[in-house]
């Protein structure tokens, strides 16, 4: 309720200058290709069935073409000759208080930027790019939901989105290191921090040290078993970047640069992004564009690295450790937007006895509903859980007992869906599955 009142209060306070600023930012974010998209929707309706929001609520406002039209109509009114001269004929509408309110509810509240609509668009409109530009305008006008912006602000001010202090981070890593030594039976096992010249810099989601330390321990176990030359960073270690979701490319670029600076400070060769869909997309694909730079180091997903370990025989796994049926969720930003779909499958085929695919899967897989910053916006929780029913139905149909999700945003959403829809499944990261299946050599083996 407080969030709703805050946004309504801000809407009431908007000045003509605020609207002008929002329109300016919106137009600046639309390059030639994106602007052309605004003229190409043929209203065929195929995007409706592609959207998990529309599939679960059946509401006109949830159809991607409708969401797009909210933006297109504003573009026509303010940036096209026909829209200025004959707005009624052009389907153009002014960017006023009512439209700004509609943008907030539609663009933040009914879209996770998953991109499945674009994949099924007959004219190839990249709808998430356009809606991110619109979100950027709303940020400029102070209309981003405060809890989403708070996540970005924490990253900018504290270096990570949960505000974990440097000493607390190091203390947690040291505790996990002790647990690692016990688990692998090797008193020399290490979780290095700030190791200069290490081959690999591994980055993590702050939710791991804060709430799920065993997932970080699992990754460390795999690195130890593979004999990897790796390190964590004492600063600039948070792979998350919610600036991708607000549409504020300046703030997103600053957050991405934190990782790049850690690479340069430590002199590492490979930046490894932990299991996070949007974190991978932001660091690997978007960051260099935001900052207009070309990195001198390689950026890969930890999934690609673990698959290499197995393929090259650097680690041994025993699939009999996982006898129950296992299915895999495809994070949108990792798979549909990021292009990483096969390493996790290759890993699971080697580490579990009964791997069952969801249908559809890979790039056509449905969003779990937790992306696009949805988990950070309490205002839209009910709609988020409703939209997640598509994923819950997918999981239930597989009959799996374990759902593997290589993304902590997805894991958080899946945990809520597990409870909401009484799925009765375990939810794991890929690293946890690999660590549990590892065949570790005895400590004294040569």
Image (spheres, rainbow, N blue to C red):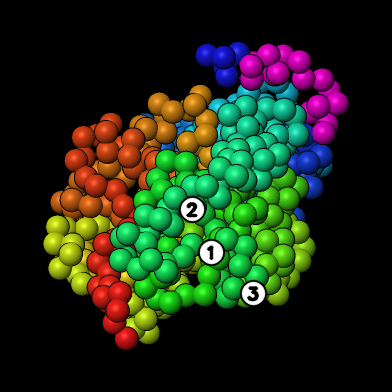
**Which quadrant would residue 71 be assigned to in this image?**
top right
Q: Nearer the viewer, residue 242 or 72?
A: 242
Among the 4 quarters of the image, the one containing residue 288: bottom right
Residue 224 in view: yes
Neighbour tally class for label 3: few under 14, some 14-19, many 20 plus, Cα within 10 Å: some
Characterize the local packing of mark 1: few (<14), some (14-19) or many (20 or more) Cα atoms within 10 angstroms. some
Q: How many marks?
A: 3
Real-space Cα distance between discs 2 and 1? 9 Å
Residue at the spot 42% in from the left edge and 63% down from the top edge = 220
- As displayed, is residue 20 above or below residue 228? above
Q: Position of residue 101 (x, y in %)?
A: 63, 23
Residue receiving disc 2: 174
Camera-side residue of 269 and 278: 269
At mark 1, the secondary structure is loop
Against 323, is 297 above or below?
below
Percent across and percent down for residue 303 are: 42, 67
**Overall secondary structure of the magenta stretch?**
helix
Instruction: Quickly name the residue at label 3.
Output: 197
Q: CA distance from mark 3 to mark 2?
A: 21 Å
Residue at 21 percent of width and 58 percent of height? 326
Q: Secondary structure at mark 3?
A: loop
Magenta stretch: includes residue 16: yes
Q: Which residues are magenta?
A: 6-21
Q: Which mark is residue 192?
A: 1
Residue 208 position, x and y percent, is 45, 47
């Amino acid at each position: 309720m407080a969030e709703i009142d805050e946004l309504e209060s801000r809407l009431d306070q908007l000045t003509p200058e605020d609207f002008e600023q929002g329109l300016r930012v919106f137009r600046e974010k639309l390059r030639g290709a994106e602007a052309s998209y605004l003229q190409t929707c043929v209203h065929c309706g195929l995007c409706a069935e592609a959207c998990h929001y529309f599939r679960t609520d059946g509401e006109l406002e949830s159809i991607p073409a409708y969401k797009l039209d909210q933006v297109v109509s504003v573009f026509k009114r303010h940036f096209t000759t026909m829209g200025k001269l004959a707005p009624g004929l052009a389907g153009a509408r002014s960017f006023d208080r009512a439209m700004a309110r509609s943008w907030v509810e539609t663009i933040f509240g009914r879209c996770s930027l998953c991109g499945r609509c674009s994949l099924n668009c007959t004219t190839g409109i990249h709808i998430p790019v356009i809606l991110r530009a619109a979100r950027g305008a709303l940020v400029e006008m102070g209309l981003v939901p405060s809890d989403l912006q708070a996540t970005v602000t924490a990253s900018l001010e504290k270096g990570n989105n949960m505000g974990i202090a440097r000493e607390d981070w190091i203390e947690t890593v040291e505790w996990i290191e002790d647990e690692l030594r016990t688990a692998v039976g090797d008193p020399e096992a290490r979780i290095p921090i700030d190791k200069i010249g290490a081959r690999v810099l591994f980055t993590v989601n702050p939710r791991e040290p804060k709430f799920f330390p065993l997932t970080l321990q699992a990754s460390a176990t795999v690195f130890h078993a593979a004999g990897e030359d790796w390190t964590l960073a004492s600063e600039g270690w948070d792979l998350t970047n919610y600036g991708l979701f607000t549409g504020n490319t300046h703030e997103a670029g600053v957050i991405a640069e934190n990782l790049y600076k850690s690479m340069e400070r430590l002199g590492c060769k490979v930046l490894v992004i932990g299991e996070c869909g949007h974190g991978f997309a932001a660091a690997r694909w978007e960051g260099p564009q935001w900052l207009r730079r070309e990195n001198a180091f390689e950026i890969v997903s930890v999934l690609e690295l673990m698959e290499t370990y197995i393929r090259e025989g650097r680690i041994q796994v025993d699939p009999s450790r996982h006898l129950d049926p296992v299915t895999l969720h495809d994070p949108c930003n990792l798979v549909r937007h990021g292009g990483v779909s096969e390493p996790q499958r290759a890993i699971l085929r080697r580490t579990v006895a009964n791997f069952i695919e969801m249908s559809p899967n890979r790039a056509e897989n449905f969003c779990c509903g937790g992306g696009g910053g949805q988990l950070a916006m309490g205002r839209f929780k009910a709609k988020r859980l409703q939209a997640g029913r598509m994923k819950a139905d997918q999981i239930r149909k597989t009959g799996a007992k374990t759902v593997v999700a290589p993304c902590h945003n997805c894991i958080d959403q899946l945990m809520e869906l597990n409870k909401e829809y009484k799925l009765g499944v375990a939810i794991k990261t890929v690293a946890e599955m690999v660590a549990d299946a590892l065949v570790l050599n005895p400590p004294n083996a040569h």
